[in-house]
Amino acid sequence: MGKYIIKKLIRLIITLIVTSFVIFLIFELVPGDPVLDKLGTRATPELVEALRIQYGLDEPFILRYLKFVGGIFTLNFGTSYTYGISVASLLKEKIVINFFLSLLALFFVVVISFPLGIYVAKHTGGLSDKIISPLNQASMSVPSFVLGLLITFFFGIVLRWFKPGGYVSFNANFGKFIYFLIFPAFALAIPKIAMCIRLLKGNILEEAGKDYSLTAYARGNNTTGLLYRHVLKNAVMPTITFIGMIAADMICSGIVIEQVFSIPGLGQMLISSISTRDFPVVEAEVMMIALFIMLISFLTDIIHALIDPRVRI
Amino acid sequence: MLTVKDLKIEFFDHDLPEVAVKDVDFTIKDGEILGIVGESGSGKSMTAMAIAGLLNRKDLTKSGVIDLDGVDILNSPRSRIREIQGNEIGFVFQDPLNSMNPVLKVGAQVEEAMRIRKKELGLSKEDMKKRALEVMKSVGLDDAERIYESYPHQISGGQRQRAMIAAALVLKPKLLICDEPTTALDVTVQKRIIDVLKELNKKTGTSILFISHDLSVIKALCDRVVVMKDGLVVEEGSVKEIFENPSKEYTKQLIF
């Protein structure tokens, strides 16, 4: 197991290096010059040259890349071209928001879809199955931002459980910050919950039909014993892999959801910094998103290995 | 000890009844090894599953009598059947790799029949492990301690099937049903598994119902044999009779 974790860690670091290089290269190649963008019609050759030196753009590509990589480890991504302040201070709060939003949504996916998936699988064809299956189908086909609007209307305006647009900074009140994020996180989670329930149910039924399940019955297991002793460990693995994959999607859908709930998260910043060619900000944002996704997939790999001995090689 | 009478199993394919097994009669006496031989689709596995109480699909109907020392297998409640499964009837399946749960240690699977009845039997963890190792050694797993801690993919096919036999025998059942237990194994391993079963029968007097399509295996192991074809019993008799003097054309075809 220790060996496996080290192997995965090495792979994580390699992926990180490759990803950072690709991200840096892309913004090097993308059309548009931040210096000219900033100066606009005031641009004179002298001013352009001066700003280039100020931004460090006169240095060779490799040197700037190495500085960028160094910045990842020290969380120093340079200075924003647009705002003139350090990228780290600009993004710190926004990254925390998206991090908590995604984690909260993932948490809902796990705590809701696992028990429901197991319950529905156990009572296939029963009343709960007949109610949950079409409900699932419906929630899978509605995008998160529409659910966000519905949630805002129902819980925000009709029931007044939260104040629409009333985001509270985590510095001000952490409890209220989390409470506010519950609603957008739910909007993010609902389609994924539906998918996970369906996946888990399918996998449980599939595993219950395998030979080892018949063996388990032949030893005197009842359905509950079969489910918890045998089937579940095998059946959760595709769902865990899937949850690792949706972590990536959570970030992207989160960017839209932020708008619906007026949360000052990464999304708005990402869009504006791309259009102003504020490359230090864009690079830092993309790198952080990539890092988050890589960490989640690293975690799912570890969980996978804990459950399935065949993976631990 | 086991009496099967007029066993009939039907399943419904698009609402049309189809007969899988019909008019099957045979008995197994204490300490006897009975073979059922037939090609695939002859209903031999269905019969074995019905005896072990494993045919619970809703699209199947079963009639007739399966009596195991006074217990009516076909009509007893499921909870009663579960008491018998793994306790009085042990079942060994064809493919030892797929019949084992890939994510559980071999030891846990060998112990399972005991663990399910832990309270009734009053067994501690140590008792169970001791018994598991004992039964594993008795079926020729000399390296029982290591295999106990191994996962199924870490041991060989022959070891897996021995472990499965150990798992079926852990509560000393009076009847061991083996459904083509040697088919997925190579010939030398096959022979050793047969020897294990023979020795077990001799030592403990456990009755064995052995299902196979391979007559040579039946000949090497069984006392009596039932020949099945298309869900019907074609012929029944002692191995000697059947092999030396088959009366039915189908049996002759199988032998030669």
Image: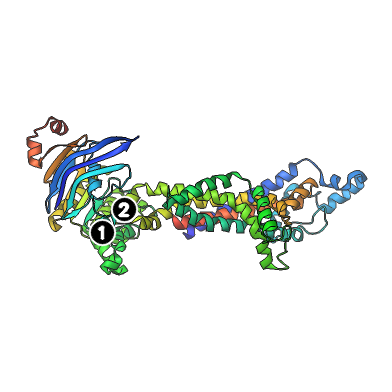
Label 1 amino acid? Glu
Image quarter in which the C terminus of chain B is found = top left
Which callout, 2 or 1, points to the residue nearer the camera? 1
User: Whole-percent x and y of residue A4?
Assistant: 49, 56
Residue drawn 79% across the image and 46% down it: A275
The correct choice, above or below, for A278 with respect to B10 in the image is: below
Left/right placement of residue A98 relative to residue B180 reads: right
Query: Which image quadrant is residue B199 in?
Result: bottom left
Residue lying farthest to the front in this orientation: A158
Tell me the CA gap for discs 2 and 1.
11 Å
User: Whole-percent x and y of residue A44?
Assistant: 92, 45
**Element at label 1:** helix
Of A54 and B224, the residue lying toward us: B224
Of A113 and B145, the residue lying toward us: A113
The correct choice, above or below, for B14 with respect to A124 in the image is: above
- Disc 2 marks which residue? A217
User: Whole-percent x and y of residue A37?
Assistant: 85, 45
Of A309 and B27, the residue lying toward us: B27
Give a yes or no on whether discs 2 and 1 share a subunit: no
What crowding class fits label 2: few (fewer than 14 Cα within 10 Å), some (14-19), or many (20 or more)? many
